[in-house]
Amino acid sequence: MTISCFIKGVLCADSVKLVAAETGTLIDKRRPSRTEGRSRSEGCYFLAALIFATLIVLVPKPLHAITLSHADVLRIGKKIWQNECNGTIAGLTSWNEGEDFASLGIGHFIWYPKGRRGPFEESFPKLVSFISKRGAKLPALFLGTGEKPCPWNSRTEFLRAQHSTEMNQLRRFLTDTIDLQAEFLIARLESARPKMLAEAAPSDRANVQEQFERLTKTPQGCYALVDYVNFKGEGVLHTERYEGQGWGLLQVLGAMHGTSDTGAVDEFSRAAKAVLTRRVQNSPAERHESRWLSGWIRRVNSYNGS
């Protein structure tokens, strides 16, 4: 129900009562004086105005879509490629030691072999579907119906196939679609926003949305959002906490309170460094997370060019 329909309902309901008062069909048969009728009508409009004002305060602002030029999207894609893969073609296809999946593309999208699943969301098949819908040509590796599992069953098989036809086709495909991979990451960021707002405390939601929108007003701010959520997650999972405190995008936005659009990226970078430092301080000692902190800090420094 819209606000206008709700108010009309309030007005109409009161009008029925007024007419009924005149005809004596629904309520007291006493005929009200003009003064009483005018008073009740004024009270009705006052009540409707009060309800309208209350709803204006309670209804959240609409979420604005992220809009970027193709050049900006490609620029963001190349920056994330540099962050995740050192900007190398070989880095677009990797399988880290100790993991049960391949990490592919500029976002190191996860691809599991057949019958294998783990604690992390598989994102590479979704990327392939996204790119296919944009009309890009797919290598033979992905042709056919349904999602394809990773054809290499282990890291050993994957490394052995480094110079195979399939691997070369895969690298060419990933090199040729940097812009579409960046678009996929931006779409994923957009889908993360309502989840973050739902997870945030009611009193914090307006600020989280405001900080998000501050950053989306510039391409550099969009890069910061896209890279960080790909790098450290949304911050909505309770399993991703140390001492009850998370380190995802939600926590970084929640630590910001500025209002200037020009200073948004600098504030985001500072907040991200503080959140990541807090993660290391709260982490279990046996994980030795301090060894990663300097690299994390370098990464978030790239958001404001420092």
Image (cartoon, rainbow, N blue to C red):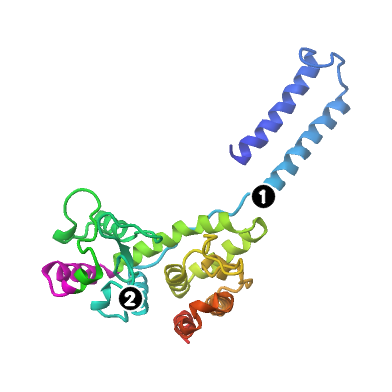
Image spot of residue 303 (x, y percent): 46, 79
Within the magenta stretch, is there residue 256?
no
Q: Quadrant of residue 115?
A: bottom left
Q: Nearer the viewer, mark 2 or mark 1?
A: 2
Image spot of residue 42 (x, y percent): 80, 35
Does residue 61 lie above or below 110 as drawn? above
Identity of the amino acid at label 2?
Answer: Trp
Magenta region, residue range? 160-178
Image spot of residue 166 (x, y percent): 14, 66
Q: Quadrant of residue 93?
A: bottom left
SS for dot 2: helix
SS for dot 1: helix
Q: Which residue is mark 1?
A: 58
Q: Say which of 79 and 141 sits in front.
A: 141
Q: Earlier in the sequence, mark 2 or mark 1?
A: 1
Name the chief secondary structure element in magenta. helix
Identity of the amino acid at label 1?
Answer: Leu
Q: For the N terminus, which image quadrant?
A: top right
Picture disc at residue 81: 2
